[in-house]
Amino acid sequence: MAGSRLEKLGTVFSRTRDLMRSGALAEAQKPLWFEVYAAFPPLREPVYREPRPRYGKVTDPIPPVLYPEDAVRAKFYEAYGNGPKAFELSQLNFKSTCQRFVEKFIELDKEGKTEPEKLFEETGNQLLAEGIILRRKGTANVAQQTLQKTKTSDLGLEMNLQTMFEAKERQQRKQDQEEEHLESADVQKENPLS
Amino acid sequence: MAAARLLRAVAPRFRGLESLGKAAPRTSQLSSRLYGTLLAPEANPPADPNAINEKLITEPLKHSDFFNVKELFSLKDLFDARVHLGHKEGCRHRFMEPYIFGCRLEQDIIDLDQTVKHLQLALNFTAHVAYRKGIILFVSRNRQFGHLVEVTAKDCGEYAHTRYWQGGLLTNAHVQYGSGIRLPDLIIFISTLNNVFEPHVAVRDAAKMNIPTVGVVDTNCNPSIITYPIPGNDDSPLAVELYCKLFKMTITRAKNKRKQMEVLYGLQNKAESG
């Protein structure tokens, strides 16, 4: 059976068709898929193209996918970090804290009662009223108490560590002092002998 | 006698003349000469199997979606299976740009409207090839889904190759396996890249051996030589499971349809001759 192994020249279909036209392939040797391809051709002819990189000024042809809510999301993540609740990717209709914040923000914006500068804080307050505590990263503004609690617990830990260190140092000093005493005692003993 | 029965069946209004024909042999010859055209119906089912085969094979090509592959999946199914998720911006292949919808935080998002069209074409093609009793070979060098692909192929009754591809498998088949070997009529790639993120050798070899290919191309793949590319995610387990399910359903559907049609045409043939 005749064949054409030139994969960089034309398509599979064009090569087989031309082989049959020239007589190298008999009608009986027509491949199975030939008529199917002829009836349902692909959207693009599978011609070989050399994958060369772009030269000169390279402009990215792919547009970025951005929504107007993304500005709100950026502000949220900047202020509150990752948010109190972790993302559950296994649920398809999962709503994260950030998403609830964004929806509340848009709602308040539509109502138009609050000024644009105060919208961010207002949404935070409303979510607090609903029961979601948002911890700011860095500055201690909202939920100071929880922050202080964590600080005291940290201090407690530090205190423990400090006391441990001090105790150890005291021990070491005691040991050194004892050694000195012993040495001095030896020296004193030696002296009268000498 | 058979001729007379056939004449009765085909041209009932010539009953009177028929008796004339039966009466005397001379008159039957006369009738056969006079009504020579009437004998044509007898020659109509010529070599029965050939004609039936012709009709059997060419009939499905006349419908745009003979196997109704459109109902097998929807755009939402593709979205839920995360088919639209591509790789990062830096991995993007230049020829995949027409199939990409946009880039969200440096991750490429594949255009699912185009994927739906491409997937329909590809599934339709595989169905027709399976209907014509073609050999289909599943190829994937992605180790995570090797077993799944092999199981899918086994369930369809087709073949799979998910291990190391020896150089002359297609191009040197007659030497490696002996003459008279039949090569696959369609190769389906669940992933067109091999383990070093280069195009799989089988893509080029299939083009060399004039074998059409159907392949799932991710944003870092080269779709130029693949006959029916399907732009989509080839790394998520959900996506690959979806593809395997769809291919298995189309191939089994096509094979069952073939059996159905053979029985149908067999019955028709019997009705005509009997």
Image (cartoon, coloured by chain):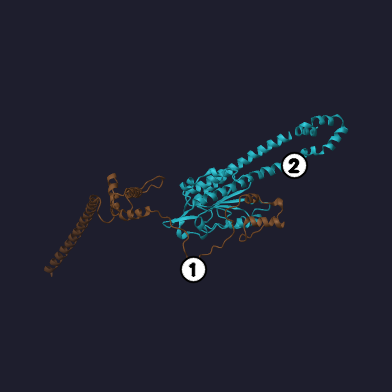
Chain colours: A brown, B cyan
On the image, the x and y values in percent for residue B256 come to 61, 40
Question: Can residue A2 be seen?
Answer: no
| Tag shown at residue B51 | none
On the image, the x and y values in percent for residue A74 come to 35, 55
In-front residue for pair B242/B197: B242
Label 2 Cα neighbours within 10 Å, binned few <14 / some 14-19 / many ≥20:
few
Mark 1 or 2, which is nearer the eye?
Answer: 1
Mark 2, residue position: B47
Label 1 Cα neighbours within 10 Å, binned few <14 / some 14-19 / many ≥20:
few
Q: Amino acid at mark 2?
A: Ala
Asked if residue A64 is positioned above or below residue A131 in the image, the reply reads below
| Residue pictured at 66% horizontal, 45% vertical | B58
| Residue pictured at 26% horizontal, 56% vertical | A139
Asked if residue A113 is positioned above or below residue B272 in the image, the reply reads below
In-front residue for pair B217/A44: A44
Q: Secondary structure at mark 1?
A: loop
Q: In this image, A62 relative to B49: left or right? A: left
Do the residues indicated by labels 1 and 2 lie within the same chain of the protein?
Answer: no
**Displayed quadrant of residue A171:** bottom left
Q: Quadrant of the N terminus of chain B?
A: top right
On the image, the x and y values in percent for residue A41 come to 60, 52
Q: Quadrant of the C terminus of chain B?
A: top right
Q: Secondary structure at mark 2?
A: loop
Mark 1, residue position: A56
What chain does mark 2 sit on? B
On the image, the x and y values in percent for residue B163 come to 55, 53
What chain does mark 1 sit on? A
Asked if residue B127 is positioned above or below residue A176 in the image, the reply reads above
Q: Amino acid at mark 1?
A: Gly
